[in-house]
Image: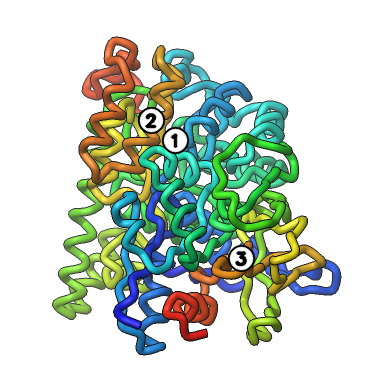
Amino acid sequence: MIPLSGDIPDSKGVICEKIDSNSVVRGNSTLKRGFAHMLKNGVVMDVTNVEQAQIAEEAGAVSVMVLDKLPSDVRKAGGVARTASIRIIEEIMNHVTIPVMAKCRIGHVYEASVLDETNVDMIDESEVLTPADEYHHIWKWDYTTPFVNGARSLGEALRRVEEGAAMIRTKGEPGTGNVAEAIYHIKKVNEELRTIKSIYDSDDKQELVKMARDLKVSYDLVEETAKLGRLPVVNFAAGGIATPADAAYLMSLGCDGIFVGSGIFKAEDAQERARAVVLATTFWDELDKVKEAQKMIDERQSLLGLDVKNLDLKMQERGSTV
Amino acid sequence: MSKIQIGILAVQGDVTENFLATMASMSELGIDGTVIQVKTTEQISELDGLIIPGGESTVIGQMSLVNGGLKKIKEKIESGMPVFGICAGMILLSKNSKDKVVGKVEQPLLDVLDVKIERNSFGRQKNSFEANISMEPIGISSFNGVFIRAPSVSETGSDVKILAKFNEKIVAVKQGNILATAFHPELTSDISLHKLFVKLVANLS
C-alpha cells in the first residue's frame, strides 16, 4: 500500500484546531495523499467554463481542472499563460459537486496562495502555464491544499514529492493531441523504478546511495520508493491524450488515472468523447468495453494534433530542472 | 459457514486500501475466505459481502450502471448480502442525496439505505480533517476518523441505527445488513471496522 504519512516536521500547511470543542487536524499527508487516492481510476478533465465543467461531471469525470485557455489554445496564443480567473473558478465550484482543481505557474507562491484561499480542492503547479520562477518550485508543505506536479523521470517525480506534492502526473506534451511523450515518460519512470527495486532487492546499499545522488533526491525517499516498487504517491498520466484507446493504453502501463486536456473540449464531439474516455479508463482491462468506447467517437472529429518533433514550444521542459 | 467471498467494487476510488484492510481482517480473525476486486455482474453474483469504497459517487454510480452492476448489487443487498459503504459508498447506498452547495444533482443511487445524505457536508478538500470518533453502539470507543470531502447523514429512517456523530452530524450508520461510514477506515491502520464487517459476512456477530 502507498504510505500516507510523510509530513515534514512543523509543516506550515498542517493546521490543528478545535471545532465545537472537538480537536481536528487538517492539511496533513494522510488527508492530502488520501484525497488523491479517491481520484484513482478516474479521469480529470480540463475545462474553461461552467458549461464544460457540467458536461465533464455528467460524463463521469472524477474532477475538473480549471484553466483560462485549453493547452492547445495556450500554444496558439503565445504570450504569458497565467492562473485562471478566480471568478470563473468560483462559479465552477458553485455548479459541480466533483472536486475542482486549478493550475498555478511553476514557482508562483502567490498564485498558489490565492488558489489555496479560494478553496480549490487541488492545485496543479503546471508547465502548461509560463513559469514564474526558473530556479525553484513551490515549497508545497506550506499549503493546506494538496498539490499535483508533473514529472518526466523518477528523479523529477521524487523531487516534487520531497517538496510536498501529494500526487504526480507523468508528463506528456500538452495541447498536441499526441500521446507519444506521455507513453515515453511513463515507460521511462517504470524502467527507473524497476532498476531501483532490483538494487533494493539485492540489498546493495552503496548502489542505492549512488542512485539517490544521481536522482538528486534524499536517500530515505529513494529507499522507500525502491522498497515499494512504485511512486510513493498516486500517479496519473497527462499530456496529449485524445482518444479512449490512448487512455486505456496508459492505464495498462500502470497509471492510476488520466488527465485529459485539449483532447476533449477541442474535439468536435466533446460530450460523447468525454463519456467514451471515462468508459475506457474504467474498463481499460476489458477490450470489448474499450472498443465500445472507441466506437463512440469519430476520428474525423478528433483534435488534429501536432508532431512533437517540430514544436516551437516544449511545455514539458519548462521550470527548474532540479 | 463455508469459505466466504468478499468483493471490493473496483470501478473507481481507493480499492486497493480496502482490499488490504479486508485481507488483514480475515487473517486476524482466522476466517477462511477470499477477497476479490469486482466489476462485472457475474463476479458480483458470486459474493457473500461487498465493500463500496471511497471515490467519487457520481463516477462509481454511472460506471456501475454501464454493465448492469448497480442493479445486481441492489438485488444482492435486498436479498440479504452484507454491504459496507465508505464515503462515496455511503452516498450510493442512500435513498436520497443532495450537495451542500450545488443542491440536488441527478445521480444513480442504490436506494437501499433509508437516509438522506448531504454531500460535501464538511466543506471542500481544505476542510478535510482527521478527528477522533466514538462508536459506542458497536463497542468501539475511539477511532481515528479520516474525513475527505466527506458527506454526512441529515435524516434517518426508523430502521437505521446511528453509530457515530461528529459535531452533531451523523457520520456512521447501520441498517440490518448495511454498514456505512462517512470517513475512511481503510486509510488508517485500524482494521476494527473492516473486522466487524467480515464478521457480519461470516455471520459471527
Question: Which numbered disc covers residue A199?
Answer: none
Question: Which numbered disc covers residue A127?
Answer: 1
Question: Which numbered disc covers residue A315?
Answer: 2
Q: Nearer the viewer, residue A7 or A33?
A: A33
Residue underneath mark 3: B181
Q: Say left or right for A78 vs B104.
A: left
* Residue at image location 61% in from the left, 35% down from the top: B106
Q: Is residue A322 visible?
A: no
Q: Say left or right for B79 vs B136.
A: left
Q: Chain of mark 3?
A: B
In the displayed structure, B178 sits above or below A243; it is below
In the picture as drawn, the residue positioned furthest to the right comes out as A20
Query: Separation of disc 3 and disc 2 at Cα?
Result: 43 Å
Residue B108: quadrant of the picture = top right
Q: Residues within 10 Å of mark 1 (few under 14, many from 20)?
A: many
In the displayed structure, B153 sits above or below A274; it is below
Q: Nearer the viewer, residue A265 or A58?
A: A58
Q: Is residue A66 visible?
A: yes
